């Protein structure tokens, strides 16, 4: 019953796979679940049957002896057969999962930070990072195509896990783990850091957005462009306020003077789904709260409490929201 | 040297058994053997760390293969120090307490010489424990061994004092057996530490 | 007449004097066992309260009951307390009390070391909880991965407490393990060859060997981490040529055998209880004994299955997948041994047996969900989620707590001399069993739904909320079950029926002496010639063993019979040392060293070391004793 719920809930469920590689894992899991339930059921019944012969106290029946070990041997042989099946099946899935059937055309570098994800798209030849496409906390991918992920970490060990697309893989400092994901249905897939990484491990969420190839190309082109120039006077004042605030120490907005590298790139912040690595949805109100006092929302995060005057804040929000 | 087994009801004793029989029959001897097992495992994991980081790094050891002169002298010292240790045990088996004392003192002197030379070698290193992973491992593992030699020396000191207090004789000298066993172990472990740090970098490069 | 005199004299020889000196100096293994049991139960209660608070935080999404700092310390302390300061010590408690009784001896091979083992255990727990009270408890999880736990990302004393408290515990556990092994090898009653040992010995013995070889790996990793924190050395730091995975290898080389260390003795207790309440000897004794030993050996070859998601080469991981599958088989043997024994016998559903039945059921669940973590691709989905949290609790509660409670209902009458209430016991069982499954079965589902472990809160709308409410309720029901046990225990002390020497009509030697046993355990060292010495006549084997009559070893000295390791042939008379405060003083010095190391008070550490040296020397300073002929 629980398992049935798992399959239909809106959760980032491992049983609700949305891609061929994750689907293989789901099928394996269902096999294991069925075997597990069968074993528990059979042993449970075997345990209950002798209760027919139970006696009330130790004095109620004389001691007996004798008996045969044959059932033990049979039981062990059956267990071994099941385990060998599980081993072979798992090994087959392991081999299958190692490489996608077609060569990925797209590669994305994901770097774990405490507590957000830095996302960089690699140039077409995968040789180096496409400096112009830097994002955070969400990955856009074309639907139906394998995408190579190069995972690493800037500080402690994190773990990249989008259950509906692929199993999890650690992001370790000083090491790049290469794996791949694919989404067979367009949509948004939730992922979350799965390796305990300290204070705000609970708020380190990543979204994978699967789009049709043309939509994806459009998104990529827009991301590659520098930040749009402020269009309204309010946005213009907002840009000035932003550039003279401490924001620039940590954040980059390409096309402006802001070039900090400690925090996420904000060039296209307006188009992002969430703030604070999935802590809040990206609305002007939430953005204002976040800038004013991120510490009250996500205690321990590097973003300091700013306490800007409301007027300044209002301008900065208007500017940032315009950065699509 | 036997105790009577009392039968209830005053019947005559059925068997007599020795009190604390031959050393390797005693609980104390087994205890020392197991202590050595767990200590040996400790060094296995220490050296595992060395070889793991060796395999993971392209330049290893970063300062280049170490000079082996002092280490070779130390190896000879420690291996040879097992000889007086062994002779001491033979002495007490022959009930010669004087012989045991002399042998313990000679073993201790060689052990102390080992510690001094090791300290000189440390002081000559161009790196400190904080330099990098190799230097940390070098000082930690040789430091662990240093501590084991020190403990061995303290054990020797205690049996020296107990010998002078007349605690041992040809039949009762388990503490001597155990201390000497431990001393041999400290020597054997050094051979592995020596091979790891001083021989393999020359071998493999 | 003569016997009575002998018993009086033995009593005078072996009893512990009253007063503080007697308390601190006692070396009686039964006192050690009782203290271990009480202390471990206190830690169980502490870990339980921590769990209750965590479940209150997680009962609803985006809850602000706890700050993330508080939650992270809580789950780390819960894990450390339960895994290190409850699960293994409670087994040591039972084994400490019963080991000499099972083998027909008067005490452990090293009685002073035995008490030292307890004192260091107590001190290590005190050291750990000092950190908690001071607000600097470890907060990086019980497996404490670097670099998160390293000096850069964990400044402060928290990690010093983690390293040093655990190091002190490894001292306690190592000397305890050596004591178990030597006692089992040298002190068994005459005639108790390895093929006649009570099965309980196999579990404790295997676990002790695993301790001897696995604990050094933990000691090494803790030393490295401590040196990084206090002295700026590098072992796990990539920039200096170290590797974070070195910590994981060293930790899991230790910690996977540790899982078996905290379940094998419990399994072997069950192998003692099942025959008694099936009214027949166990079927498949040899299978069971070898299976336990095989688990202990194979347990050293599966550590990488905790690291399947770290990106190691698939080929290398496959070996460990095969090992993880293979290690299931010996456990399957144990289950079938118990099943066949119950089938061929007449089960008596006492509370102890009820806990055994519950245990077998939970063991099977904890076994089959463990297969998920052993299969590499399946593990990629379930590791580090609530699925694994569920698995670890089915293992630790199902295979440790339930057998321990079965053992309590079975053996506490031997310790206290009084029976516990069977009626309350059945309530106790059902409340715990239901609470356990309501709390932990749905956690599997949370894991499959993508909920990672170690998050202090979660968002609404992910399908996790309702299940978390159920889990929290289950946890509180389970806690209620533990309270019922405590209630039953105190009721039995006050008003329980007198147990008599052998209330369950069991077969093994501990039931051949009074309840509670006299300080010297057995007036007569039994001679054993079958696996079931107290049953052999009724099993039609004829009377072979001599349990109540036979030779008394000297009533003038504290001695027991020393026998050969394999055949149990009489070899020598072993002397026991007198009571001594040195073990306590040595443990106290070690605690001083620990505080010195944690706080960087080098004078304190050095002073502790000097004192420790003198106390150990005093401890070992035996003048030759006159030997009567």
Image (cartoon, rainbow, N blue to C red):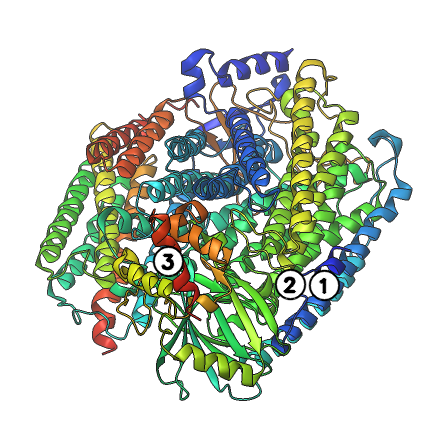
| Nearer to us: label 2 or label 3 | 3
Residue that lies at the very extreme toward the right in this rendered image: A52
Residue C612: mark:
none
Task: Determine which residue is flagged by label 2.
Answer: A13
Report how far apart the C-alphas of labels 2 and 1 lie in the structure: 7 Å
Dot 2, how many residues are within 10 Å of its Cα: few (below 14), some (14-19), or many (20+)? many
Q: Could you tell me which residue is drawn at 84 percent across and 52 percent down?
A: A45
- Residue C77: % across, % down: 47, 40
Report how far apart the C-alphas of labels 3 and 1 lie in the structure: 45 Å
Q: Could you tell me which residue is drawn at 62 percent across and 20 percent down?
A: B8
- Residue C309: % across, % down: 50, 66
- On whether disc 2 and disc 1 are found on a single subunit, the reply is yes
Q: Looking at the picture, does residue B131 appear above or below residue C181?
A: below
Specify the subunit that label 3 lies on: A
Task: Determine which residue is flagged by label 1.
Answer: A7
Side of C457 relative to A67 (left or right): left
Specify the subunit that label 1 lies on: A
Specify the subunit that label 2 lies on: A
């Amino acid at each position: 019953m629980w398992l049935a719920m798992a399959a239909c809930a809106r959760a980032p469920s491992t049983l609700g796979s949305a891609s061929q590689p994750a689907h293989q894992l789901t099928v394996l899991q269902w096999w294991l679940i069925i075997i597990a339930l069968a074993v528990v059921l059979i042993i449970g019944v075997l345990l209950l049957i002798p209760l027919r012969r139970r006696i009330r106290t130790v004095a109620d029946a004389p001691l007996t002896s004798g008996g045969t070990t044959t059932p033990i041997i049979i039981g062990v042989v059956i267990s071994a057969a099941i385990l060998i099946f599980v081993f072979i099946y798992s090994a087959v899935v392991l081999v299958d999962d190692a490489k996608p059937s077609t060569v990925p055309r797209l590669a994305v570098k994901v770097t774990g930070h405490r507590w957000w994800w830095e996302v960089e798209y690699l140039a077409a030849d995968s040789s180096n990072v496409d400096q112009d496409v830097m994002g955070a906390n969400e990955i856009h991918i074309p639907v139906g195509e394998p995408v190579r992920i190069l995972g690493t970490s800037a500080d402690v060990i994190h773990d990249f896990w989008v259950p509906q697309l692929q199993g999890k893989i650690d992001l370790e400092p000083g090491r790049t783990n290469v794996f791949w994901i694919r989404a067979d249905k367009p949509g948004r897939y939730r992922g979350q850091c799965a390796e305990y990484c300290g204070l705000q491990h609970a708020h380190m969420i990543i979204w994978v957005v699967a789009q049709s190839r043309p939509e994806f190309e459009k998104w990529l082109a827009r991301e590659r462009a520098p930040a749009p120039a402020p269009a309204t006077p309010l946005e213009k004042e907002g840009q000035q306020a932003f550039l003279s605030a401490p924001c620039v120490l940590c954040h980059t907005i390409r096309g402006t003077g802001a070039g900090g590298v400690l925090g996420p790139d904000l060039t296209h912040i307006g188009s992002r789904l969430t703030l604070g690595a999935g802590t809040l949805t990206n609305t002007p109100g939430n953005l204002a709260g976040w800038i004013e006092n991120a510490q009250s929302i996500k205690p321990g995060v590097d973003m300091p409490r700013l306490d800007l005057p409301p007027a300044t804040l209002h301008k900065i929000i208007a500017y940032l929201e315009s950065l699509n | 040297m036997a105790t009577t087994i009392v039968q209830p009801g005053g019947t005559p004793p059925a068997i007599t058994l020795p009190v604390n029989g031959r050393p390797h029959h005693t609980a104390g001897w087994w205890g020392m053997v197991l202590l050595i097992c767990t200590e040996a495992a400790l060094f296995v994991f220490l050296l595992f760390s060395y070889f793991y980081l060796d395999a993971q790094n392209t330049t290893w050891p970063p300062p280049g293969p170490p000079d082996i002169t002092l280490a070779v002298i130390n190896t000879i010292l420690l291996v040879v120090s097992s000889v007086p240790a062994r002779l001491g045990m033979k002495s007490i088996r022959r009930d010669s307490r004087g012989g045991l004392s002399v042998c313990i003192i000679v073993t201790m002197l060689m052990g102390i010489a080992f510690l001094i030379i090791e300290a000189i070698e440390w002081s000559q290193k161009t790196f400190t424990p904080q330099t990098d992973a190799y230097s940390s491992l070098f000082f930690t593992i040789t430091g662990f061994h240093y501590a084991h030699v020190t403990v061995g020396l303290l054990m020797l000191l205690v049996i020296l004092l107990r010998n002078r207090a007349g605690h041992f004789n040809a039949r009762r000298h388990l503490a001597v057996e155990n201390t000497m066993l431990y001393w041999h172990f400290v020597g054997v472990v050094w051979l592995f530490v020596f091979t790891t740090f001083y021989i393999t970098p020359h071998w493999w490069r | 007449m003569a016997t009575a005199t002998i018993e009086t004299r033995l009593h005078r020889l072996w009893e512990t004097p009253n007063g503080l000196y007697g308390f601190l100096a006692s070396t009686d293994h039964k006192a050690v066992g009782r203290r271990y049991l009480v202390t471990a139960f206190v830690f169980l209660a502490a870990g339980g309260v921590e769990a209750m608070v965590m479940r209150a935080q997680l009962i609803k999404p985006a809850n602000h009951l706890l700050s993330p700092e508080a939650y992270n310390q809580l789950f780390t302390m819960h894990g450390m307390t339960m895994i290190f300061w409850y699960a293994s010590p409670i087994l040591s408690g039972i084994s400490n009390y019963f080991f000499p009784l099972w083998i027909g001896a008067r005490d452990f091979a090293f009685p002073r070391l035995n008490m030292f083992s307890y004192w260091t255990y107590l001190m290590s727990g005190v050291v750990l909880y000092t950190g908690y009270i001071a607000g600097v408890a470890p907060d990086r999880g019980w497996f404490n991965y670097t670099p998160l736990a390293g000096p850069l990302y964990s400044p402060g004393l928290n990690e010093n407490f983690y390293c040093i408290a655990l190091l002190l515990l490894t001292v306690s556990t190592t000397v305890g393990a050596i004591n178990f092994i030597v006692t089992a090898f040298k002190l068994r009653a005459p005639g108790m060859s390895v093929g006649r040992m009570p099965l309980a010995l196999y579990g404790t013995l295997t676990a002790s060997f695993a301790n001897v070889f696995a604990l050094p790996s933990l000691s090494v990793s803790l030393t490295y981490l401590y040196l990084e924190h206090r002295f700026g050395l590098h072992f796990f730091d990539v920039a200096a040529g170290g590797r974070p995975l070195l910590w994981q290898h060293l930790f899991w080389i230790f910690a996977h055998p540790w899982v078996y260390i905290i379940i094998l003795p419990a399994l072997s207790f069950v192998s003692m209880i099942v025959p008694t309440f099936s009214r027949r000897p166990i079927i498949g004794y040899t299978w069971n004994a070898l299976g336990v030993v095989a688990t202990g050996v194979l347990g050293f070859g599966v550590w990488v299955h905790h690291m399947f998601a770290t990106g190691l080469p698939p080929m290398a991981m496959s070996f460990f997948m095969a090992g993880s599958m293979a290690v299931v088989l010996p456990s399957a043997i144990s289950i079938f041994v118990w099943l066949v024994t119950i089938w061929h016998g007449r089960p008596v559903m006492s509370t102890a047996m009820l806990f055994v039945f519950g245990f077998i059921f939970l063991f099977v669940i904890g076994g089959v969900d463990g297969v998920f973590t052993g299969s590499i691709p399946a593990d990629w989905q379930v590791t580090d989620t609530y699925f694994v949290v569920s698995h670890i609790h089915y293992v630790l509660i199902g295979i440790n707590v339930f057998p321990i409670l079965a053992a309590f209902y079975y053996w506490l009458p031997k310790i206290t001399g009084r029976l516990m209430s069977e009626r309350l016991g059945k309530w106790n069982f059902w409340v715990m069993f239901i609470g356990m499954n309501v709390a932990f079965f749905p956690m599997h589902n949370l894991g499959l739904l993508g909920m990672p472990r170690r998050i202090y809160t979660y968002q609404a709308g992910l399908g996790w909320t309702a299940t978390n409410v159920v889990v929290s309720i289950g946890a509180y029901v389970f806690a209620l079950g533990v309270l019922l046990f405590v209630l039953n225990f105190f009721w039995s002390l006050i008003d329980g029926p007198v147990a008599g020497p052998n209330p369950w009509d069991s077969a093994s030697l501990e039931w051949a002496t009074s309840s509670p046993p006299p300080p010297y355990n057995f007036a007569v060292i039994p001679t054993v010639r079958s696996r079931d010495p107290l049953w052999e006549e009724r099993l039609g084997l004829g009377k072979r063993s001599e349990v109540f009559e036979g030779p008394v070893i000297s009533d003038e000295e504290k001695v027991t019979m020393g026998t050969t390791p394999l055949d149990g042939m009489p070899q020598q008379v072993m002397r026991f040392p007198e009571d001594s405060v040195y073990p306590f003083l040595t443990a106290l010095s070690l605690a001083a060293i620990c505080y010195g190391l944690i706080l960087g008070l080098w004078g304190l550490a050095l002073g502790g070391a000097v004192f420790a040296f003198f106390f150990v020397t005093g401890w070992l300073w035996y003048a030759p004793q006159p030997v009567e002929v």
